[in-house]
Amino acid sequence: MLRYWKLIGIFTIIILSVGTYYVQAGLASNNYPDFSIQKISGDDKAVEDLTLITRYVSNNHSYGDYLKITREGSVYQSELSYMDRLTGLYIDSEIKRLQKDYRNFMRGKGESIPTFFENEEWLVHVGPFGIDYHETSFEVEMLDKNTKDVTSFQVNIPDKNYQYMNIQDVQMIQDELSIVTRNFYSGGPSQSDTEEFHVYRVDIGNQKIISDDVIYSNEGDYTGSEWTHLGEVNSYSSIGQEDYFVFRLDYVEQDDRADSSMHTRTEYIAYEYAANELVEIDLPDKLKGIENIVHVNGSTIYFIETKEEELQITAYHIENQELNTIDIQTTEEVYDMNYFPIVKNGNMYITNFGDEGANVLVIDTETEELLYEGKVESTDQQSFKDGYLDFNQIIVE
């Protein structure tokens, strides 16, 4: 009999715990406003499959809560079921798809987009994402989608002097893997630290690194008053086939009088995977500012600028080095904070944030037509003064 009483006690505790969880989750979500996408002009079909993943941060809290916003309204992570919360709204939708479709292969792989590559035949993972000086190899796993066979092997990293490195991209070109990393080196007491972009090319058949190419190093860029910061541009944009890895050089100058530093200009460089060489990107001066919003899709780099009720998109085509500009007139002011653009199926989707709300714009990049103009609105417009939306992801089904 005692055994049954123990089971009843355990069951009661579970019920009370689950009940407490949902009560607390409900109370937490009630502290945040509801949001939805509202049309100003255009075709509703342009956003019928659009979901915005963002985080609402109250001015009274430093963290806030993740939520998804559609035309129908919003759902906070704290309102999800316990099982749905385990996957989290903050996890990239591509990673969620892989975890659903290739559950066994994805087990223990982490959630960093740059460590994956996928095409019609292969799903590849190279890890870990972050490697410190104690670790000396990449772990490679390749899933053959047709046979379901998995090939696993280690490759030793030839460079042993790094302090740490991060994987920026993985590409598969015929029977080779290209692993792009950002390596950090300690300069010591009298020297400046150094950052480098490396491309490690791996022969899949022999399971060995066949080359380690430094495609850029800022060693020597430090002059005492000016230095460069390296930044990746498209490493998180896709796990599919890419022709280029695009990165930026931000030049910073020390202002001794103000005891501060300021950005002076930005340059962009593209590494072409197939040719294993750098491609110069020659831009007009107005596109070399750090305030420009940049997005890479295929072989095109998009620069986005705003001016009140006007949006200007400049497309730079790497292959032929041509520029073309798209001028978009909007009905309402285009805000200039927290830009998040993506291009999918020929349309550019843009969200951003300002003190009065958030824009939602859909532009056809071929016809240069504004297909949809909308806003993220709240049931309480004071929400945009009491906090802000930190956009994390745009999902177009």
Image (cartoon, helix red, strand yellow):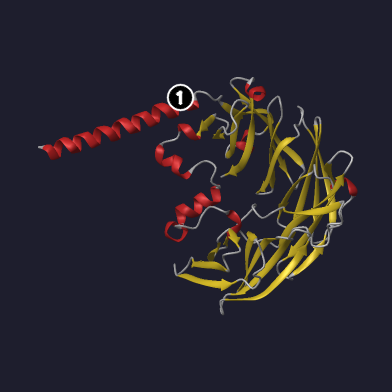
Q: Is residue 264 visible?
A: no
Asked whether 29 or 318 is in front, the reply is 29
Residue 200, above or below 262: below
> Image quadrant for the N terminus?
top left
Q: Position of residue 222 (x, y in %)?
A: 83, 57
Q: Residue furthest front?
A: 189
Q: Residue furthest bottom?
A: 206
The secondary structure type at the circle numbered 1 is helix
Identify the residue at horizontal 86%, vertical 38% (top origin).
258
Q: Position of residue 220 (x, y in %)?
A: 83, 62
Q: In which quarter of the image is residue 54?
A: top right
Residue 293, above or below 126: above
Tag 1: amino acid = Leu
Residue 161, above or below 9: below
- For mark 1, does the 10 Å Cα neighbourhood hold few (<14), some (14 to 19), or many (20 or more) residues? few
Residue 183, above or below 22: below
Q: Quadrant of residue 360?
A: top right
**Does residue 359 appear left or right of residue 25 in this picture?**
right
**Does residue 25 appear left or right of residue 234 in this picture?**
left
Mark 1 lies on residue: 27
Q: Position of residue 342 (x, y in %)?
A: 67, 46
Asked whether 114 or 123 is in front, the reply is 114
Identify the residue at horizontal 36%, vertical 29% (top origin).
20
**Does residue 280 appear left or right of residue 137 in this picture?**
right
Q: Where is residue 273 in the image (x, y as percent from the top left)?
A: 70, 67
**Does residue 280 appear left or right of residue 239 in this picture?**
right
Q: Is residue 354 visible?
A: yes
Identify the residue at horizontal 74%, vertical 46% (top origin).
365
> Image quadrant for the C terminus?
top right
